[in-house]
Amino acid sequence: MDSPAFQAVPAETTLENNVSQVLEIQGKKIALVKTNDGLFALDNSCRHLGGSLGKGIVRNNCIVYPLHRWSFELSSGKCVNGGADEKNATHEVKVEKEKFS
Ligand code: FES
């Protein structure tokens, strides 16, 4: 994980399973995804050409940027299809009192 500090997400944020979305937290865009395995947060900017991963497709515990198909593992940010040795930064997510940050 890349950031030790937790930041609250906007209170109105709702999550659907396997649907990515973009949140802006302290001026930084984050792709947030909920799956049956938990909540995952990655830097929104794709390591390829900066596409919005929050507008990506969630499949097999990865997020796929639809235009060029680079695919990043949700848990590690590791690129598993596309650029070898590329990795998108990930961020730890925790849920407190039924709210997440
Ligand atoms: S911008 Fe992400 S795959 Fe091209």
Image (spheres, grey):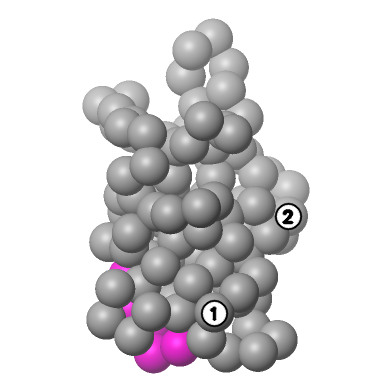
User: Compared to 10, does 1 lie above or below?
Assistant: below
* SS for callout 1: strand
Would residue 6 appear left or right of 12 to someone viewing this image? Answer: right
Let me know if residue 72 appears in the view. yes
**Magenta stretch holds residue 50:** yes
Q: Callout 1: few (<14), some (14-19), or many (20+) C-alpha neighbours within 10 Å?
A: some
Q: Amino acid at mark 2?
A: Met
Seen at 68% across and 59% down, the residue is: 76
Front disc: 1 or 2: 1
Image coordinates for residue 80, horizontal then vertical, percent: 61, 74
Q: Is residue 7 left or right of residue 85?
A: left
Residue 16 vertical position relative to residue 91 in the rendered view, above or below: above
Lateral position of residue 63 relative to residue 22, left or right: right
Figure quadrant of residue 87: bottom right
| First in residue order: circle 1 vs circle 2 | 2
Measuring from the top left, give residue 61's x and y in whole percent: 54, 51
Q: Secondary structure at mark 2?
A: loop
Q: Label 1 sits on what residue type?
A: Asn
Per the model, the C-alpha gap separating discs 1 and 2 is: 21 Å
| Image: magenta residue range | 47-52
The residue labelled by disc 1 is 81
Front in this rendered view, residue 17 or 94: 17
Residue where numbered disc 2 is placed:
1
**Image spot of residue 77 (x, y percent):** 62, 65
Badge 2: few (under 14), some or many (20 or more) residues near its Cα, within 10 Å?
few
Quadrant holding the N terminus = bottom right
Q: Which residue is located at x 43 percent, y 45 percent?
A: 33
Q: Residue furthest front?
A: 60
SS assignment for the magenta stretch, majority:
loop
Please say if 38 is above or below 67: above
